[in-house]
Amino acid sequence: MKKVIVAMSGGVDSSISAALLKKQGFFVIGAYMILSDLKESREAKKRAKQVAKLLNIPFLIWDLRKEFKRIIIKGFLKEYQAGKTPNPCVICNKEIKFGLFLKKALSLKSDYIATGHYARIKKNKIVRLYQGKDKEKDQSYFLWQLNQKQLKKVIFPLGGYTKKEVKEIARKLDLPVFDQKESQEICFISKTTEQFLKKNLKLKPGKIIDEGGEEIGEHQGLALYTIGQRKGIRLSGGPYYVLLKDLKNNYLVVTKKEKDLYRKQLIAKNINWVSSIKPKMPIGVKVKIRYRHKSVPATVSFKKGRYLVVFKKPERAVTSGQSVVFYKKQELLGGGIIC
């Protein structure tokens, strides 16, 4: 009997992942990762333990707070301080869920790990990663940094299900998570990102200037703003949009013309090809520049030692620090960090 350790978060997705794998004949163990001291984390741990008991599977608790703080939270703050808008879920998947968690599972002689991600894997000589059946819930965007070694040891039980179907299974099994609220966007932030940044960063106020260089106001610290932002700039006579952040002069540059936010291309770094094979360049793909962003046609090429992504039509608010992810039909080819 193959052994699988399921990353149980106390939510409906990971709970049903464990239930489905047990039904499929795996020896299932649930494991909860303590990542923060938030009240929500304590409640989630309690729910995960309760579900494991109802499913009659062993349950482990792994305290990864120290590693999570060092790798994810400090990295998140460092990126914001540098004027970027990072995506901590992407790094967490690579370093924590499919990094440390996988390592711990393998040390316990587990054959696989499983999570509640809505994504699909096809395993042949090369492991390929695909979007989940539920297009609204598809989470392949967050998995572009995974490699072949990791993916060979991973199962995504929910790839072929919709969220509605998963909730229905939970209801039929009478699990206490079937009507559980969706978790917030960033798991280590209890209120808003702005409050978290104000509490943890040294913010330096500076000038707000328009695209002509005229001073029209004062910002509270560049880390609090992101490209394309309209609300919270606190300027009269708007609406104004954040056009760029001038770190050297500590200026926030804004515009009244939304068309100024559109860009025809971007440069990406830290590229990862999921198959570990770099495709022949240039390559036509569909790209996403944000999780909730609709995928759009683009061409990826490698020129002068860097990756250039050229959109078929200009895209709004291309933001450094975010992920650009490449798809061929439903297959996730890879991605990079926008710089």
Image: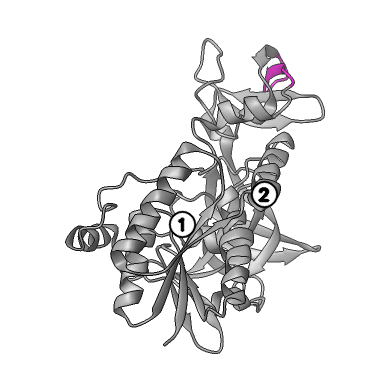
Q: Which residue is more in the foreground, 47 or 77?
A: 47
Q: Circle 2 — which element?
A: helix
Q: Is residue 295 left or right of residue 283?
A: left
Which dot marks residue 13? none
In this view, 97 is above or below 189: below
In this view, 233 is above or below 168: above
Residue to which mark 1 is pinned: 295
Residue 135 x/y as whole percent: 35, 60
Residue 94 x/y as whole percent: 61, 62
**48 is within the stretch colored magenta:** no
Q: Answer few, some or many: residues within 10 Å of disc 2's Cα (few below 14, many 20 plus, some between 14 and 19).
A: few
Report the span colored magenta: 204-214
Q: Which residue is more in the foreground, 320 or 27?
A: 27
Q: Say whether residue 177 is visible.
A: yes
Q: Answer few, some or many: residues within 10 Å of disc 1's Cα (few below 14, many 20 plus, some between 14 and 19).
A: some
Q: Which residue is more in the foreground, 170 or 267?
A: 170
Q: Say whether residue 297 is visible.
A: no
Q: Which residue is more in the foreground, 136 or 165?
A: 165
**Kind of residue at badge 2:** Lys
Which dot marks residue 66? 2
Q: Is residue 282 left or right of residue 136?
A: right
At 40% across and 63% down in the image, what residue appears? 118
Residue 173 position by quadrant = bottom left
